Image: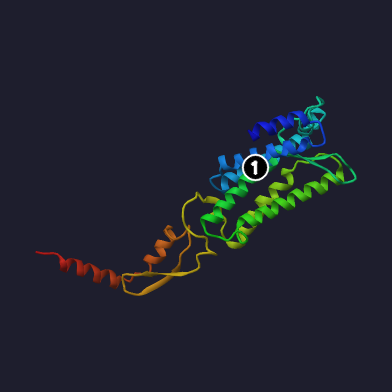
């Protein structure tokens, strides 16, 4: 089928000027399948994963030459002198004066992509318009991080760990918006359950106290059922109301 044709085309044309087309199509399909298969449960796991890979990428690009005399990550990407490259990266011909190709590893797309996919599901679950939610911010952060990578790459003319710029761009953008909205705890602990963020659920709901007086509080996920909220509501119940309710209960019981 088409998949077999793409693989055959890559094998035949991989060393030609059009080999990158087949490799990028295969890579795009693989990355899309990965996003549909793997899902991050919450921001806590996303932060742990991306932070670990942030330092992993920096080590193998910048620090590994101190141990192995060469950057292991760059050597693997270029085929380590074998003339063959592992088709685990995106190749884009460069039109700048430096020539050559720009290479982006699958991990540099897949790992931030898992975060962006999580934020997209978060926005949809809470009925947030895409252009106002975390998805758009993280996508813009990815673009800025990738553009920064390309600028530094052209300026230094040496391989760069893309996650050095992509992780702050995506993860940093999400946390910045959550901080501005006061939703860090909501985003951090979200497990895919219901409830709307504070900037979406802005209506006042009524809580009727036993004294018959109506007290209003703002429904906000994460504190509506907390001990502090229950204590605050209980404090509004007057002793007279409690006593009158007990007398009514006693009077309703038979001898």
Q: Residue furthest top?
A: 82
Place of residue 206 in the rendered image (x, y in percent of width and height, measured from the top left): 40, 70
Q: Residue furthest front?
A: 1
Q: Quadrant of residue 91?
A: top right
Label 1 belongs to which residue?
111
Q: Nearer the viewer, residue 160 or 105?
A: 105
Place of residue 4 in the rendered image (x, y in percent of width and height, measured from the top left): 66, 31
Question: Horizontal placement of 226 versus 107: left or right?
Answer: left
Question: Horizontal placement of 91 versus 209: left or right?
Answer: right
Q: Quadrant of the N terminus?
A: top right
Place of residue 12 in the rendered image (x, y in percent of width and height, measured from the top left): 76, 29
**Residue visible at 65% across and 53% down?**
138
In the rendered view, tell whether residue 117 sits above or below residue 233.
above
In the rendered view, tell whether residue 111 sits above or below residue 86.
below
In the rendered view, tell whether residue 35 sits above or below residue 179.
above
Q: Nearer the viewer, residue 179 or 95?
A: 95
Q: SS of the residue at dot 1?
A: helix
- How crowded pointer 1 is (Cα within 10 Å; few <14, some 14-19, many 20+) is rated as many
Q: Residue furthest right?
A: 97
Residue 86 visible in the snapshot? no
Place of residue 237 in the rendered image (x, y in percent of width and height, measured from the top left): 34, 69
**Residue visible at 80% across and 24% down?**
82
Q: Quadrant of the C terminus?
A: bottom left
Q: How many marks?
A: 1
Q: How is the image coloured?
A: rainbow
Q: Nearer the viewer, residue 70 or 162?
A: 162
């Amino acid at each position: 089928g088409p998949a077999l044709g793409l693989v055959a085309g890559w094998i035949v044309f991989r060393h030609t000027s059009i080999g990158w087309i087949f490799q990028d199509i295969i890579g795009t399909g693989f990355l899309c399948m990965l996003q549909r298969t793997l899902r991050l449960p919450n921001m806590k796991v996303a932060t742990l994963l991306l932070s670990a890979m942030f330092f992993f990428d920096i080590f193998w690009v910048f620090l590994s030459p101190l141990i192995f005399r060469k950057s292991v990550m760059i050597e693997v990407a270029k085929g380590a002198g074998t003339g063959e490259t592992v088709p685990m990266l995106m190749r884009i011909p460069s039109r700048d004066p430096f020539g050559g190709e720009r290479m982006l590893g699958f991990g540099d797309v897949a790992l931030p992509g898992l975060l962006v996919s999580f934020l997209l599901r978060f926005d949809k679950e809470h009925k947030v318009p895409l252009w106002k939610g975390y998805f758009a911010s993280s996508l813009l952060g990815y673009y800025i991080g990738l553009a920064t990578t390309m600028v530094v790459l052209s300026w230094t003319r040496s391989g760069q760990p893309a996650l050095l710029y992509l992780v702050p761009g995506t993860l940093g953008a999400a946390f910045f918006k959550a901080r501005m909205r006061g939703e860090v705890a909501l985003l951090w602990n979200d497990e895919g359950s219901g409830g709307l963020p504070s900037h979406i659920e802005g209506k006042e709901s009524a809580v009727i106290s036993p004294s018959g007086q109506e007290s209003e509080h703002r429904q906000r996920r994460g504190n509506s059922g907390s001990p502090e909220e229950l204590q605050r509501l209980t404090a509004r119940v007057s002793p007279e109301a409690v006593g009158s309710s007990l007398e009514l209960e006693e009077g309703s019981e038979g001898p």
